[in-house]
Image: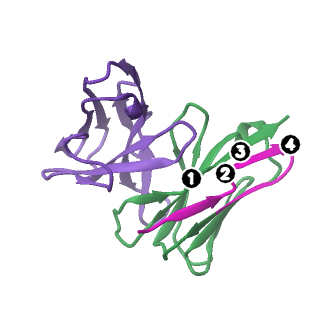
Chain colours: A purple, B green
Amino acid sequence: SAVISQKPSRDICQRGTSLTIQCQVDSQVTMMFWYRQQPGQSLTLIATANQGSEATYESGFVIDKFPISRPNLTFSTLTVSNMSPEDSSIYLCSVAYRSGRSPGYGYTFGSGTRLTVV
Amino acid sequence: GQQVMQIPQYQHVQEGEDFTTYCNSSTTLSNIQWYKQRPGGHPVFLIQLVKSGEVKKQKRLTFQFGEAKKNSSLHITATQTTDVGTYFCAGKGGSTLGRLYFGRGTQLTVWP
């Protein structure tokens, strides 16, 4: 499976500032996904990062607030812009990789970025 | 839009008891995946089910995919304290590389 290095692992930020989260994958992957997870809650997909084109955002998420870059097939960043306390959450990147054990693709996650906005 | 419902939200069992979590989709899935997230950790892929009626086992864990490919279950036999965590199902629609639709998860607590 693919191995993802995600950083920072945590940060405390002032409201109104921006934070950029990075994910580096040890192999080329077609699709990368960015999720948000509130404590004790499920994962909510923010957007799908496409290499060479604009990210595809889910309902409720916009590019101005969560700009995403995907310069190549191994790297992506998510920026949380103009932060407010409501943005406090865990942010995770995920990639699909071809699973050798069964047909189709498995998904692996980065270790997450725990963001607190004060 | 596509939704995946998962129950129960919480389950508390004594060590040695069995545990089951259920997922149900509003639409037919191409496959369903199960993940485990330990407290403070990130989701870890457990298994993927693709075929209608498929049953897979991993030691004490049994995964089932319904005949209609709309529901799935995870059953743990004789739970251990190491089973503690939140178990998520995630369904995928028709696209090979498409997004996953996560259930809300079942948080399992095991008392020694």
Which is nearer the N-term, disc 4 or disc 2? 2
Task: Give the residue type that dot 1 points to.
Answer: Arg
Residue at image point 46% right, 59% down: B101
Discs 4 and 2 carry the same chain letter:
yes
Q: CA distance from mark 4 to mark 2?
A: 17 Å
Task: Give the residue type that dot 3 points to.
Answer: Leu
Residue B2 painted magenta: yes
Q: Secondary structure at mark 4?
A: strand
Residue at image point 30% right, 50% down: A47
Residue B9 painted magenta: yes
Q: Do the CB atoms of the residues marked 1 and 2 lie less than 8 Å apart?
A: yes
Location of mark 1 (residue)? B104
Q: Is residue B84 left or right of residue B90?
A: right
The image shows residue B24 at horizontal and vertical percentages of 59, 68
Discs 2 and 3 carry the same chain letter:
yes
Location of mark 2 (residue)? B9
Q: CA distance from mark 1 to mark 3?
A: 13 Å
Q: CA distance from mark 1 to mark 2?
A: 7 Å
Q: Residues within 10 Å of mark 2 (few under 14, many from 20)?
A: some
Q: Residues within 10 Å of mark 3 (few under 14, many from 20)?
A: many
The image shows residue B112 at horizontal and vertical percentages of 85, 34
The residue range painted magenta reads B1-22
Frontmost of labels 2 and 3 is: 2
Residue at image point 56% right, 52% down: B104
Q: In the current view of this chain or complex, which residue is farthest to the bottom?
A: B68
Location of mark 3 (residue)? B108
The image shows residue A89 at horizontal and vertical percentages of 44, 33
Q: CA distance from mark 2 to mark 3?
A: 9 Å
Task: Give the residue type that dot 4 points to.
Answer: Gln
Q: CA distance from mark 4 to mark 3?
A: 11 Å
Task: Give the residue type that dot 2 points to.
Answer: Gln
